[in-house]
Image (cartoon, rainbow, N blue to C red):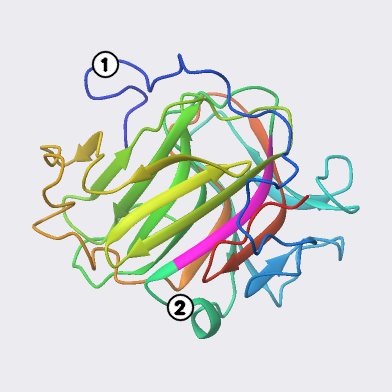
Amino acid sequence: MDAPASLPDGSMPDASASDGPTEASSGSDASPDAASGACSAGLFCEDFETGKIDPNKWDTVVSPGSAVDVQQQTVAHGKYAMHVHGQSGPSDWALLLVKNAKATLGGTSTFGRVNFFTAPGPLTSGHTQMVFAGMNGTGSANGPAPFPKLRYMEVSNIGGGWQVGFDLLDVGPLVEEVAYPKGKVPISAWTCLEWTFNDQPTTATFWIDGTQVGTFDNTDIAYASPGPIPKPGTFVYNGMNAGIIGGFDTFGVGFHDWHPNMPFDLYYDDFVLGTKRIGCMP
């Protein structure tokens, strides 16, 4: 139910632009409220420095054969970081979901920040989700596992490039609309990813090392299923520019690989959620 490995015209997302940053920035381009430490900003924070996945903070959702753990070999700050492993077989996932998020983070706008490291090389699958936020819908349809009713926005990579947009899994036929910002997903170096998802109006923006990379809104939709692609400046979906997701009370980090074609490992550290831009760590 998701975007193909190629764009609708058969080409891949623009990978001709210069490589994205390969080293974490100093944080000088981040917002004024940039955190001085992993957990000194935001409403929810996880730096994994307990050395394990805290069951009081997280629900773990893992498909057979995939893995999520906390390790010491590859870290951005401190001694520990989260690790997820993907396979080369059928659609798979390894995700941490924030527990009891609705009470503190529920709303129609959300911000996040995480440091990530991709290995061994660019992910070449057709759609590999990294971070998402949404809520369960009330439609009559049931989408694929592991969240068959979820309406959500995400930052993902596709064929080594970027993808940002939304999916509605409770609607038949299932709905996906995304933009393909230019540039490559940094690999083999710790990189700061920031994002904001909004539902009033329905938009998504993300930054890499403090620099804005792309936005999904009613002016930039590159792929829509079912089509046709909305005309720029009209409506995002079904005559609406707002209220499409319904709000945000479910938050996840890790991966969901819709079209696996190679094993890979992703590492995450310094994960923060809040109601305003958090900024990169120095």
Looking at the image, how many numbered discs can be counted on the residues? 2
Image coordinates for residue 17, horizontal then vertical, percent: 47, 18
Residue depicted at x 64% and y 56%: 279
The residue segment tinted magenta is 110-117
**Is residue 189 found inside the magenta-colored segment of the image?**
no
Residue depicted at x 61% and y 61%: 278
Tell me where residue 54 sits by quadrant: bottom right
Q: Quadrant of the N terminus?
A: top left
Q: Is residue 49 visible?
A: yes
Q: Which mark is residue 106?
A: 2
User: In the visual, does 117 lie left or right of 164?
Assistant: right
**Is residue 112 found inside the magenta-colored segment of the image?**
yes
What's the residue type where badge 2 is placed? Gly
Mark nearest the camera among 2 and 1 is 2
Residue depicted at x 36% and y 32%: 180
Image coordinates for residue 202, horizontal then vertical, percent: 28, 59
Residue depicted at x 45% and y 73%: 249
Q: Which mark is residue 10?
A: 1
User: In the visual, does 50 lie left or right of 105?
Assistant: right
- Is 138 drawn above or below residue 189 in the view shown? below
**Residue situated furthest bottom in the rendering:** 103
